[in-house]
Amino acid sequence: MTKTIFIALLDDFAAAWNRHDTDAILSMMTEDCVFEASRGPNVKGTIYTGQDDVRRGIEEVFATFPDAQWNGPRHFISGDRGVSEWIFTATGPDGTPVEVQGCDIFTFRDGKIVIKNSYRKQRTG
């Protein structure tokens, strides 16, 4: 697939996250997809594997941050990998505003996303 097609996929993927449209998000991911969340107890955050588990992970993000937005996404592609950079804004569970820079690193297979590995800054003070 061409870089242009993968860029369009990531544009659609980002838009689905901003709509909080879990079904649309999962439609762009493989059956054996992996979502490595930026938060969690392990060195790699929390890892969700397979469509059902990834659905649970996505819904946890939306439940924790009901107004979450990934603003100004910019993408680049290299082979079967891609990166999206964005500014995450939301209201935390305690009512505190959140605004941090982050990125996702993707692995593609057969025109879909097989791995979404998410990172975001941790602000202090």
Image: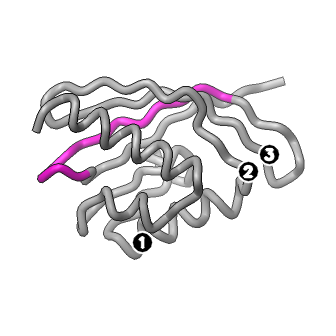
Is disc 2 placed on a helix, strand or loop?
loop
- The span from disc 2 to disc 3 (Cα, nearest Å) is 7 Å
- The span from disc 2 to disc 1 (Cα, nearest Å) is 22 Å
Is disc 1 placed on a helix, strand or loop?
helix
Residue ranking furthest to the bottom: 52
Tag 1 or tag 2, which sits nearer the N-term? 1
Q: Position of residue 116 (x, y in %)?
A: 36, 47
Residue to which mark 3 is pinned? 91
Name which residue type carries label 2: Asp
The disc label shown at residue 67, or none: 2
Nearer to us of marks 1 and 3 is: 3
Residues tagged 2 and 3 counted as in contact (Cβ below 8 A): yes
Name which residue type carries label 3: Thr
Query: Taking 61 as reference, is 44 above or below it?
Result: above
Tag 3 or tag 2, which sits nearer the N-term? 2
Residue 29 in magenta stretch: no
Residues tagged 2 and 1 counted as in contact (Cβ below 8 A): no
Residue to which mark 1 is pinned? 53
Determine crowd level at label 3: few under 14, some 14-19, many 20+ residues with C-alpha closer than 10 A.
Answer: some
Which residue appears at 24% of the width and 66% of the height? 32
Front one among 94 and 44? 94
Query: On the picture, is 105 further left or further right than 58?
Result: left
Which residue appears at 48% of the width and 56% of the height? 46
Q: Quadrant of residue 124?
A: top right
Name which residue type carries label 1: Asp
